[in-house]
């Protein structure tokens, strides 16, 4: 499935500003972004529930913008699960098959039975529902109504209803956001396993970077209606293409410090550092992840401790390295932080330094290293 | 949880009981008269209870006029009206609640405006139209004018607007056509509204005397209230006992139906946004 330069506006507001996205067959692709970035709209366009104003939606190279979700053979799991409250679990899961495999007349309550083959088809559908229920551990719940199920069970029914058609693309819209933290971790593993087992393409919309990073082959980070960066999770974390991407990705917010650089000389908090690869002086923003800073008595970054936040496995230290510049660093939890206001030094590796243009925010092929004494 | 009955509660309760008594009195009187022997009906005193039960009134009600036939007509007419009203109102309501199209607001506005127009305003043009089509004295004349119910559209649309849109998107993804969504998903979920609407519709048309009196003169097509009128026209003069018995028989199905559907009915009204 592929999107080419898809645009969509709602009443004058441009929600999608040219989305191009390739979902390789069998991949697990995440659309990650804050709320309102257009990721759900993108998913709806992929599902055929919405149409792009311009641009193309391609499946196997064919334009499918005008086709319904069924014609595209796409299935979707909704954030609210959207189970039919008046149908049992079995009926919920059977409905997509009933609609596809029985004709209009065969579906009629009494008349349908007159048509030869209706009963066999119905029996085949029942068998597939039973098999899907067994796979998702729902066998005991087939006779229940959705209202009688827990959140996790409803979630599994929604997945079952979507998977039963054996769709070519499987879309999930924030499917875990209504579950509690523990169940979420468990469902994450189940969804990953399901992806491996079915081998279908999954497109997963989420605002939770942990979900996106832990499950995906590729993550498309969407910001303000554009794809800010697309690539394997590791690439997004290690080489963010812009300041905005760097700021979004990472459990601990990245430290972003504006600095003017000249060949051989950095300024401000980084005065003890030397730029690598710089030819002409320029103003940049240095990005350093808290988890890449370590306490080092000989480190180039010097500051005073303003705060220490103990989190069990780790301690987040906040240092004031210059007037108006605070930097956060993550130290292991067993480190006893020094008294407030005591001077500390931090070190970092040059490969962990991200340098962005101060105006445009795009990544620059530069780094910093400690200046020799 | 129990709570203590306060002074205001008692006052309210007494008020409600009085109100109920006032409303119930004519019914009690009707039932009482229907069971009184003919000589007791026109006595000067007011006796709420008959001295002996006169079941002959009920036998007369069925034998003097063709009451069974009228009841049957009532079922056909009310059933026909309800089926067609539902058939038209539910898809309309779904479209107004969950589809985006040009003029949706205007059409909904028209529906609301339609609620304000009493049927009697349009009765004469409709009668003339039916006369022109030579449909007077047919079931069609009794049913057709009511098949499009703005009240039904309004009630269903208010109820459906509260159903989550995701549900219908899910159905679209599952391969249901818009028609299938209406009847397989939206309609079953709107059952409380449907029940409420059915009670309103059946009560109104079962009890309606105005329209059958205008379009039907053939006794074979008379609806129950129209049929009761035949007692007065009967040559025997005012035959109050059997008349009241017939009235009881005609009212009973409605009361039974309402009692059966009571809970869903109130739920439908509450959810339909008709409550204050």
Image (tube, rainbow, N blue to C red):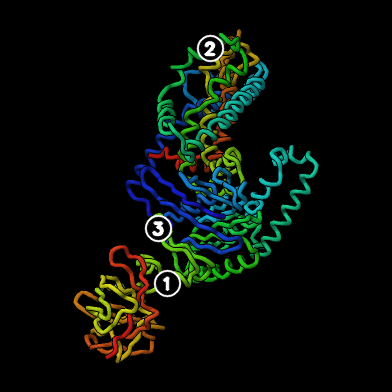
Disc 2 to disc 1: CB gap under 8 Å: no
According to the image, label 3 marks what residue? A35
Q: Earlier in the sequence, mark 3 or mark 1?
A: 3
Q: Is residue A320 visible?
A: no
Q: Quadrant of the C terminus of chain B?
A: top left
**Count of number-bearing discs:** 3
Q: Nearer the viewer, residue A45 or B203?
A: A45
Residue A186 on image: x %, y %: 55, 71
**Element class at badge 3:** loop
Of A365 and B135, which appears nearest the observer?
A365
Q: Which mark is residue B129?
A: 2
Indicate left or right for B54 with B21 as reference: right
Q: Kindly identify the residue that appears in the image at 52 percent across and 21 percent down.
A: B208
Instruction: In the rendered view, tell whether residue B73 sits above or below residue A8.
Output: above
Q: Secondary structure at mark 1?
A: loop
What subunit carries mark 2? B
Residue, disc 1: A239
Q: Residue at the right extreme?
A: A116
Question: Which chain is mark 3 on?
Answer: A
């Amino acid at each position: 499935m592929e999107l080419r330069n898809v645009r969509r506006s709602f009443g004058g507001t441009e929600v999608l500003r040219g989305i191009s996205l390739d979902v390789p067959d069998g991949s697990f692709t995440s659309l990650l972004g804050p709320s309102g970035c257009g990721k759900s709209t993108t998913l709806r366009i992929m599902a055929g529930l919405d149409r792009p104003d311009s641009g193309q939606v391609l499946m196997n190279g064919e334009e499918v913008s005008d086709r319904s979700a069924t014609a595209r053979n796409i299935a979707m799991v909704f954030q609210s699960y959207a189970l039919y409250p008046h149908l049992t679990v079995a009926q919920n899961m059977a409905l997509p098959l009933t609609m596809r495999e029985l004709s209009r007349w065969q579906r009629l309550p009494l008349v349908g039975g007159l048509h030869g083959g209706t009963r066999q088809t119905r029996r085949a559908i029942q068998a597939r529902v039973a098999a899907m229920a067994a796979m998702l551990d729902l066998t005991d719940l087939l006779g229940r109504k959705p209202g009688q199920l827990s959140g996790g069970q409803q979630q599994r029914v929604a997945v079952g209803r979507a998977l039963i058609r054996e769709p070519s693309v499987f879309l999930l819209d924030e499917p875990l956001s209504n579950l509690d933290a523990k169940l979420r971790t468990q469902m994450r593993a189940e969804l990953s396993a399901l992806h491996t087992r079915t081998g279908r393409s999954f497109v997963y919309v989420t605002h939770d970077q942990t979900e996106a990073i832990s499950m995906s082959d590729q993550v498309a980070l969407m910001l303000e209606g554009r794809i800010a960066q697309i690539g394997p999770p590791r690439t997004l974390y290690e080489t963010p293409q812009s300041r905005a991407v760097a700021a979004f990705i990472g459990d601990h917010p990245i430290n972003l410090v504006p600095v003017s650089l000249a060949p051989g000389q950095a300024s401000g908090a980084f005065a003890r550092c030397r730029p690598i690869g710089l030819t002409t002086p320029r103003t940049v923003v240095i990005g350093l992840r808290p988890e890449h800073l370590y306490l080092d008595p000989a480190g180039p970054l010097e500051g005073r401790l303003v705060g220490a936040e103990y989190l069990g496995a780790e301690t987040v230290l906040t240092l004031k390295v210059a007037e108006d510049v605070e930097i956060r660093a993550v130290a292991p939890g067993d480190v006893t932080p020094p008294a407030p206001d005591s001077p500390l030094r931090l070190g970092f590796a040059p490969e962990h330094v991200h340098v962005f243009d101060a105006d445009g925010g795009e990544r620059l092929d530069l780094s910093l290293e400690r200046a020799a004494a | 949880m129990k709570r203590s009955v306060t002074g205001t509660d008692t006052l309210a309760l007494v008020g409600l009981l009085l109100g109920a008594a006032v409303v119930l009195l004519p019914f009690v009187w009707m039932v009482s008269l229907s069971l009184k022997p003919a000589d007791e009906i026109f006595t000067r005193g007011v006796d709420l209870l008959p001295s002996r039960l006169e079941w002959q009134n009920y036998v007369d009600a069925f034998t003097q006029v063709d009451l069974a036939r009228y009841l049957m007509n009532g079922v056909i007419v009310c059933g026909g009206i309800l089926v067609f009203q539902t058939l038209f109102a539910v898809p309309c309501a779904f479209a107004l609640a969950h589809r985006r199209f040009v003029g949706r607001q205007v059409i909904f506005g028209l529906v609301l405006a339609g609620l304000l127009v009493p049927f009697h305003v349009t009765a004469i043009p409709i009668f003339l139209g039916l006369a022109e089509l030579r449909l007077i004295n047919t079931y069609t004349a009794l049913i057709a004018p009511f098949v499009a119910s703005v009240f039904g559209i309004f009630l269903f649309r208010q109820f459906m607007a509260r159903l989550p849109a995701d549900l219908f998107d899910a159905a679209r993804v599952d391969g249901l056509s818009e028609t299938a969504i209406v009847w397989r998903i939206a309609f079953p979920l709107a059952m409380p509204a449907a029940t409420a609407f059915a009670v309103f519709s059946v009560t109104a048309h079962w009890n309606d005397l105005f329209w059958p009196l205008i379009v039907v003169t053939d006794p074979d097509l008379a609806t129950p209230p129209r049929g009761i009128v035949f007692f007065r026209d009967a040559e025997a003069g005012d035959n109050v006992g059997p008349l009241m018995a017939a009235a009881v028989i005609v009212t009973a199905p409605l009361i039974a139906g309402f009692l059966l559907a009571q809970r869903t009915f109130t739920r439908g009204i509450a959810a339909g946004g008709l409550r204050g």
